[in-house]
Image: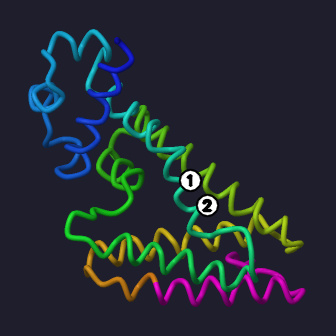
Amino acid sequence: MEETTRSRIVAAAEALFYAHGLRSVGVDAIAEHAGVTKRTLYYHFKSKDDLIAACLAARDGPTLERYRGWLGDSGPLPDRMRAMFAALAAHADRPKWRGCGFTRAAVELAGQPGHPAVAMAAAHKRRFEAWLAEVLLGEGIADAGLMARQLIILLDGAIAQMLIHRDVAYAAAAGRAAAAIVAAGAAGGTAPSMYTD
């Protein structure tokens, strides 16, 4: 019963935070949305900050699984990359889409680098980048770590631009760039260096 109540609070908070932002949503609104008392909420979470971190932790696995599904595991990797970005575009082409909750949390709390939600967002992005590197290594691509970093920059850049402009064409453009990078690596090339001496 307690875990059900905790999950309900997290789900309510997640929906409100995603729709309205972290700072603008109060504990009273979350408790009301979850159908619990404020005292019950604080029984499960010692602070709003802990609740924010719990919401991000709850989204970590499902977010990675969604992208794994979009990428798939059969067919040429450049085609799969284009498909992943196309799926992102379709996902973003909804009135209630608000971008990446992890990035939004890190940006909103940029002045509090020690905040547990910032740490959770950073950990999620590291896991996502490691997953991409693992996919690339599985395809025999050299310098998979650098290429994974380039791909996540394309992905997060596309998400930011779609959020700013409400135009999913940015995901398609990023998907073409991602496919070209991966194709070059699959052909025996290396990821273009992002660094200069």
Q: Is residue 185 magenta?
A: yes
* Residue 133 image point, x, y percent: 74, 62
Residue 41 vertical position relative to residue 104 in the rendered view, above or below = above
Q: Amino acid at mark 2?
A: Arg
User: What residue is drawn where x is 39% and y is 49%?
Assistant: 106
User: What residue is drawn where x is 62% and y is 50%?
Assistant: 126
Q: Which stretch is magenta?
A: 172-197
Q: Is 195 situated left or right of 9 in this image? A: right
The answer to whether the residues at label 2 and label 1 have Cβ atoms under 8 Å apart is yes
Q: How many marks?
A: 2
> At numbered mark 1, what does the secondary structure look like: helix, strand or loop?
helix
The local crowd at label 1, few if under 14, some if 14 to 19, many if 20 or more residues have their Cα within 10 Å, is: some
Residue 47 vertical position relative to residue 125 in the rendered view, above or below = above
Residue 113 vertical position relative to residue 84 in the rendered view, above or below = above
Residue 69 vertical position relative to residue 120 in the rendered view, above or below = below
> At numbered mark 2, what does the secondary structure look like: helix, strand or loop?
helix
- Residue situated in front as seen by the camera: 96 or 101: 96
- Which label was assigned to residue 68? 2
